[in-house]
Amino acid sequence: MQSVLDDGKKRMAGAIAALDKEFSKLRTGRATTALVDGIIVDYYGTPTLINQLSSVSVPDSKTLTIQPWDKGAFGAVEKAIQNSDLGLNPVNDGKIIRISIPPLTEERRKDLVKIAKKYSEDAKIAIRNVRRDMNDILKKMEKDKDISEDDKKHGETNVQKMTDDFVKQTEEVLAGKEKEILEI
């Protein structure tokens, strides 16, 4: 039964990690290398992540710089950034690509909060699905006479407590991201 709980805990922690990763991609008006991490560049016919063919840095809180290692990749990197859903406008001076992060409008901030809430809800659903899977395994173990009914009840109580803890953690992460987004 402990292995079931350990596995479930690991899967629930994975849902929180996935939520953190999604939140790192949300633009908050502050420059971060995570903004461009998921952008894929068509590099000589091969889809390549932007950070695998260039160095990405943050010289200040409102600017992102990208320096492709291959001079021939400048156009492809610039095009990939423009085609991304980030709404950023890169400036290519032939040596480096600069991206100024414009301040967010009030409307855009509210949209970002809605997106963050959706990501948070998806994480909660994933956590609840893990809870359901764990409870199903416990029921099967009881049916197969591997554990007693009391052990199953005790296990279900532990599973619910773990679920509540991870849902609370999700809400705390969301509250932090909301504060970051709404900060001017």
Image (cartoon, helix red, strand yellow):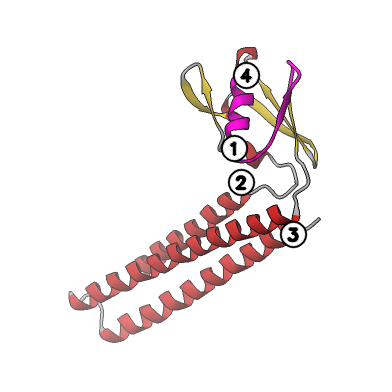
Q: Which residue is mark 4?
A: 75
Label 3 amino acid? Answer: Leu
Q: Indicate whether residue 90 is drawn in magenta.
A: yes
Numbered-mark total: 4
Badge 3 crowding class, 10 Å Cα cut-off, few under 14, some 14 to 19, many 20 or more, is some
In what quadrant of the picture does the N terminus appear?
Answer: bottom left
Q: Position of residue 152 (x, y in %)?
A: 31, 80
Q: CA distance from mark 1 to mark 4?
A: 18 Å
Q: Which residue is mark 2?
A: 25
Q: Which residue is mark 3?
A: 182
Q: CA distance from mark 3 to mark 2?
A: 16 Å
Kindly check if marks 2 and 1 are in contact, taking CB atoms under 8 A apart as contact.
yes
Badge 2 crowding class, 10 Å Cα cut-off, few under 14, some 14 to 19, many 20 or more, is some
Quadrant for residue 177, please give it.
Answer: bottom right
Please provide the residue range marked out in magenta.
75-96
Q: Residue at x 48, y 56 (%)?
A: 14
Q: Residue at x 31, y 86 (%)?
A: 150
In what quadrant of the picture does the C terminus appear?
Answer: bottom right
Q: Nearer the viewer, residue 184 or 12?
A: 184
Depth check, mark 3 against mark 2: the one in front is 3
Label 2 amino acid? Answer: Lys
Direction top: furthest residue? 72
Depth check, mark 1 against mark 4: the one in front is 4
Q: Position of residue 4 (x, y in %)?
A: 35, 67
The answer to whether residue 44 is visible is yes
Label 1 amino acid? Answer: Asp
Q: Indicate whether residue 44 is drawn in magenta.
A: no
Q: Residue at x 45, y 60 (%)?
A: 10
In primary-sequence order, the first of circles 3 and 2 is 2
> As displayed, is residue 88 above or below residue 105?
above
Kindly check if marks 4 and 3 are in contact, taking CB atoms under 8 A apart as contact.
no
